[in-house]
Image: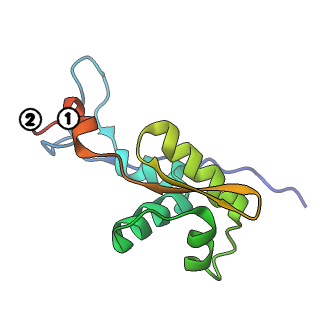
Amino acid sequence: MRIEPTRKAIPRTPADSAESAPRAGAGDESSFDWGALVSHVVHPAKVAMVEAIAWFEEPLSPSQLERIFIGSGWSVQLITYHAKSLLSWGALEVAEERQVRGVIERAYYFPAREAHRDHDLRS
């Protein structure tokens, strides 16, 4: 039995939508559906981490997040990996560091709004 690989295409939105109109010079009848792309490339752990930190409104460490996500199957290592990724993107920052059993545990929170004032599209 031979299994044929499938290529799942990222959905495209109708070109007649003002929000999804193609960029000038794109030469494509439809524009790219960024929402569909994000759901394919952003790991659910990243989304869950951001939502948990926003919900609790306080810095959380990967070990705290692991306890919050009990039953998800996400290890502290996986959560730490994704926290570092969010840190490198500027979505999170190290808010606290504390010594726990000989290891430095970092708690992450959102960067101060003033730090991203230049990137705010509304100003």
Residue placed at 60% from the left, 63% from the top?
Answer: 62
Residue placed at 62% from the left, 60% from the top?
Answer: 79
- The quadrant where residue 119 appears: top left
Residue 32's x, y, as percent?
35, 39
- Quarter of the figure with the C terminus: top left
Residue placed at 63% from the left, 68% from the top?
Answer: 63
Asked whether, in this view, residue 41 is left or right of residue 120, the answer is right
SS type, badge 1: helix
- For the residue pair 97 and 70, the one nearer the viewer reads as 97
- For the residue pair 21 and 108, the one nearer the viewer reads as 108
- Residue furthest right in the image: 1
Q: Which residue is mark 2?
A: 123
Residue 36's x, y, as percent?
41, 52
Q: Is residue 11 above or below residue 66?
A: above
- Quarter of the figure with the N terminus: bottom right
Crowding around mark 2 (Cα neighbors within 10 Å: few <14, some 14 to 19, many 20+) is: few
Q: Inspect the image, locate mark 1, and give the three-letter code of the amino acid beneath it.
A: Arg
Q: Inspect the image, locate mark 2, and give the three-letter code of the amino acid beneath it.
A: Ser
Q: Earlier in the sequence, mark 1 or mark 2?
A: 1
Residue 93's x, y, as percent?
45, 46
- For the residue pair 122 and 27, the one nearer the viewer reads as 122
Q: Do the CB atoms of the residues marked 1 and 2 lie less than 8 Å apart?
A: yes
The mark total stands at 2
Q: Which residue is mark 1?
A: 117
Query: Which tag is nearer the camera, tag 1 or tag 2?
Result: 1
